[in-house]
Amino acid sequence: MPQAVQPWEYKIAPCYSKSTAEKISKKHPQEFQNVLKNLDTYKKTLDEGVPLEQAKRTLPFVHNEQKGLLAIDQRPPKGGVQLRLYIYPQEQVRIIHLTSIGDKQSQQKDIKAGHQFIQTL
């Protein structure tokens, strides 16, 4: 009988701005919900036992931002904005760290914050 695998958990990193996420969710509610739905799909994929590298290659909304940082994006509705949720999946402890969420304008800042967070682990 196969052994039960511990599900992955979400953890909000210290660099994640809840106020920024709240502003984005109010300004772009559809895009925000879409990116969260894609995050949930990513987690379910990992919970099913799909290896990190395979999940990253097969899910079209997952993008590698180097040093282990990943971006989860969504297909915006017509006239919408492209949001990216930055995450760091820590395989040893099965935690998906949420490091930031933003749009194209905050992309470089968000990636830098994610890389800095990873260095602290």
Image: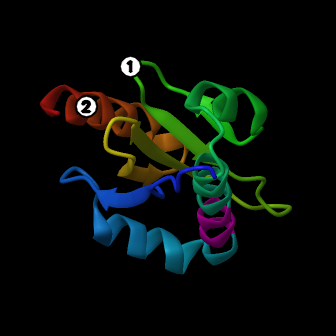
Q: Nearer the viewer, residue 3 or 39?
A: 3
Secondary structure mostly taken by the magenta-highlighted segment of the chain: helix
Q: Is residue 32 inside the magenta stretch? A: yes
Other-residue count near label 2 (Cα within 10 Å), few / some / many at <14 / 14–19 / ≥20:
some
| Quadrant (top left, top right, bottom left, bottom right) of the C terminus | top left
Alpha carbon of mark 1 to alpha carbon of mark 2: how far?
8 Å
Q: Are marks 1 and 2 in contact (CB under 8 Å)?
A: yes
**Could you tell me which secondary element the residue under label 2 belongs to?**
helix
Residue on which disc 1 sits: 67
Q: Which residue is pictured at 67% across the width and 35% down the height?
A: 55
Q: For the residue marked with disc 2, what is the amino acid?
A: Ile
Which residues are the magenta region?
31-37
Mark positioned earlier in the residue sequence (1 or 2): 1
Q: For the residue marked with disc 1, what is the amino acid?
A: Lys
Tell which residue pokes out farthest to the bottom in this image: 26
**Could you tell me which secondary element the residue under label 1 belongs to?**
loop
Q: Is residue 35 inside the magenta stretch? A: yes
Q: Is residue 25 above or below residue 35?
A: below
Q: Nearer the viewer, residue 42 or 32?
A: 42
Residue on which disc 2 sits: 118
Indicate how the structure is coloured in the image.
rainbow
Residue 109 place in picture, x, y as percent: 34, 36
